Image (cartoon, rainbow, N blue to C red):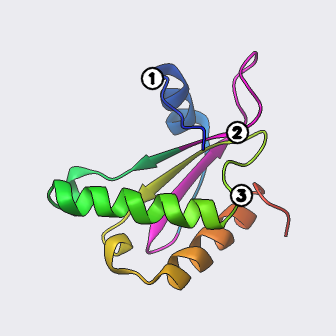
Amino acid sequence: MRTLTSPSDIDRLFKHGRRASQPLLVLLASSPAEGRDARGRVMFVAGRKLGNAVVRNRCKRVLREAARRAGAPWPGQDVALVARPGTSTASPQELDDALVRLLRQLGVTPR
């Protein structure tokens, strides 16, 4: 899975990307910048408010698996998945449902 690592691309995504949220996660999506690879990239974020490093790493791990099950990376899209407090304890089915709903809401995947 291709990951989004460039600081300038990350700033652009957080400033200008489309946002949608659920109680378990937040999704940001935008088209890649001109001249960038259009194959799609993904980024996983778990802030310090969620807890210690163990909890944050678990959140990113479960988000990575949910993204894989949902078909990431999505062509023509840069996507950031941001963990929320319930992410680490949610069931895989709950995360999958929330992620698919957000992807459809932002038009990343077809309805």
Name the image quarter holding the C terminus. bottom right
Looking at this view, is 44 or 9 the one in front? Answer: 44
Q: Position of residue 24 (x, y in %)?
A: 44, 72
Looking at the picture, does residue 13 appear above or below residue 46? above
**In screen coordinates, is 62 left or right of 18?**
left
**Relative to 89, residue 18 above or below:** above
The quarter of the displayed image where residue 37 is located: top right
Binning the other alpha carbons within 10 Å of mark 1 as few (below 14), some (14 to 19) or many (20 upward) gives few
Please determine whether, in this image, residue 9 is positioned above or below residue 70: above
Marks 1 and 2, how far apart at CA: 16 Å
Q: Which residue is mark 2?
A: 40
Q: Which residue is located at x 75 percent, y 15 percent?
A: 35
Q: Secondary structure at mark 2?
A: loop
**Image quadrant occupied by the N terminus:** top right
Residue 40 forms part of the magenta stretch: yes
Q: Residues within 10 Å of mark 3 (few under 14, many from 20)?
A: some
Q: Amino acid at mark 1?
A: Pro
The region drawn magenta spans 22-42
Residue 106 included in the magenta stretch of the image: no
Q: Secondary structure at mark 3?
A: loop
Left or right, 41 with reference to 25? right
Q: Residue 87 location, x and y as percent?
A: 38, 71
Q: Earlier in the sequence, mark 1 or mark 2?
A: 1
Amino acid type at image mark 3: Leu
Residue 70 occupies quadrant: bottom right
Helix, strand, or loop for circle 1?
A: helix
Q: Which residue is mark 3?
A: 106
The residue labelled by disc 1 is 7
Q: Residue type at mark 2? A: Gly
Q: Quadrant of residue 54?
A: bottom left
Q: Main secondary structure of the magenta part?
A: loop
Mark found first going from the N terminus, 1 or 3: 1
